[in-house]
Amino acid sequence: MPVFAVEYTYDNRAAERDAVRPEHRAFLRALHETGALLASGPFEGGASALLVVVAADDAAARDLLTGDPFAAAGLLADVRVRPWSPVIGVFAHLV
């Protein structure tokens, strides 16, 4: 199944994001348990994050994340989805 690198860029409402973060992380844990989310975490500085997902295509990768509480709360200024082809490391066997 194809792998996608998803970059979240957060808006400037850090306090609201902090309040929703426990729900956001529970949502991501659930995706991880299904195997759809391989890894996630914020970039240094906290203004954006990387999520690595497996999905049939770009639209399916986006659909996986529509239920994210950060998205539902309007806390994402931008979501960038790009196909990614890991060739070395723990995700390389997926392509």
Image (cartoon, rainbow, N blue to C red):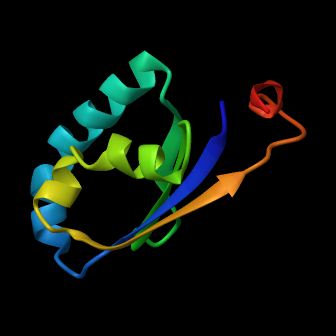
What percent of the width, then of the height, locates residue 25?
A: 28, 38
Q: Is residue 38 above or below residue 87?
A: above
- Rendering coords of residue 12 (x, y %): 23, 82
Q: Position of residue 61 (x, y in %)?
A: 46, 46
Left or right of 68? Residue 2 is right
Q: Give the mark count.
A: 0
* Residue at image coords 10%, 61%: 73
Locate residue 72 relative to residue 95 in the image: left or right. Answer: left
Which quadrant of the structure image shows residue 52?
A: top right
Q: Is residue 3 left or right of residue 16?
A: right
Image height check: is 54 above or below 6?
A: above
Q: Residue furthest right?
A: 88
Quadrant of residue 8 in the image? bottom left
Residue 81 vs residue 38, the one in the foreground: 81
Query: Is residue 28 or residue 63 the one in the foreground?
Result: 63
Image point (23%, 44%), residue name: 24
Viewport quadrant of the C terminus: top right
- Which quadrant does the N terminus fall into? top right
Find the residue positioned furthest to the top.
33
Q: Which residue: 43% across, 25% down? A: 32
* Residue 88 in picture, x, y percent from top left: 90, 38
Query: Outermost residue toward the bottom?
Result: 12
Residue 56 vertical placement versus 93 (above, below): below
At x 71%, y 51%, the residue is 84
Q: Is residue 64 left or right of residue 87?
A: left
